[in-house]
Image (spheres, rainbow, N blue to C red):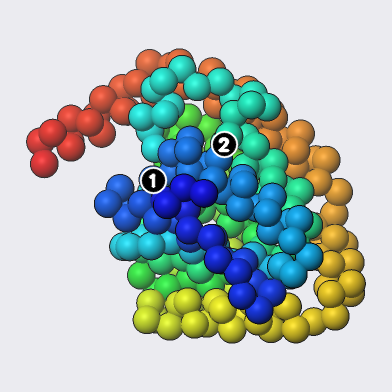
Amino acid sequence: MSEQVLVSSADGVCEIRLNRPEKRNAITLAMYEALCAALAGAQADSAVRAVLMSGEGAGFTAGNDLNDFLSGLKFDGDNPIMRLLGALATFGKPLLAAVHGKTVGIGTTMLLHCDLIVAARSTVFSMPFVSLGLVPEAASSLLLPRLVGQQRAAELLLLSKPFDAATAQSMGLVNRVVDEADLLSEARKLARDVVAQPVEALLAARRLLRGDPAEVLARLDAEAKVFQERLQSAEFRAAVFAIASRGRAG
């Protein structure tokens, strides 16, 4: 398992922690592979009753590592990003997340596949796909309107503007907002409360809540086709050039 993805299990909870703090936990293809392996291991392990995701350092994740997007990546079934999104969409056990600081792109959209989320007050969420010349992913074009309503989802996805933890809670994106010092302890307590439930009833209730994943998987594929096209666009390359130029200027 990659050291940039830390995995541990205790008392029925598997913790998966992003560990690339020097790059704000920007997720590389190797990290996606490690995340896929971690979820597969948690699904197969009967001792694991729930999974808790979190991030090391100043923030949960800065999203995808843009360098991978410039490498001619194909968004097909072999792509580790697509495999992770499929794994999240079909995962059979409760998924929890503890987020803080910058929570960008897929860092936000992957939360739509989670059951319970605790956010630090420091959290700043953003889904800057359109501002990068791209389109939403992770089935967020389907799941976000379901969660927050069509107009609010349009505002978040079309304008790419960041929003804070209080706003996320008011929209129903997160369950609890706490001080950053209390983030992991609160999330772990919530995970313990989950695994204390009768397991068969818990899993059956979760299946009913989530419904048939077929529509989500179909939207993942539809988004991926457009996302692939947008990676070749002049708008995307101009956005990446602008980001690189700001970095050199800084």
Viewer-proximal residue, 57 or 4? 4
Q: Is residue 107 above or below residue 136?
A: below
Residue 18 horizontal/vertical position (percent): 45, 56
Q: Is label 1 in a helix, a strand or a loop? A: loop
Q: Is residue 188 above or below residue 219?
A: below
Residue 158: which numbered mark, if any?
A: none
Viewer-proximal residue, 214 or 134? 214
Name the residue located 55 percent from the left edge and 66 percent from the top edge: 8
Distance between the alpha carbons at the discs numbered 1 and 2 = 13 Å
Name the residue located 48 percent from the left edge and 38 percent from the top edge: 30
Q: Is residue 207 visible?
A: yes
Residue 81: which numbered mark, if any?
A: 2
Residue 56 horizontal/vertical position (percent): 38, 62
Determine which quarter of the picture holds residue 242.
top left
**Left or right relative to 245: residue 138:** right
Viewer-proximal residue, 149 or 86? 86
Q: Is residue 114 above or below residue 126?
A: below
Q: Is residue 147 visible?
A: no
Residue 199 horizontal/vertical position (percent): 84, 75
- Which quarter of the image is occupied by the C terminus? top left
Amino acid of disc 2: Ile
Name the residue located 51 percent from the left edge and 68 percent from the top edge: 98
Q: How many marks?
A: 2
Amino acid of disc 1: Ala
Residue 26: which numbered mark, if any?
A: 1
Furthest-front residue in view? 1
Residue 160 horizontal/vertical position (percent): 43, 44
Pointer 2 local density, CA inside 10 Å: few below 14, some 14–19, many at least 20: many
Q: Is label 2 in a helix, a strand or a loop? A: helix
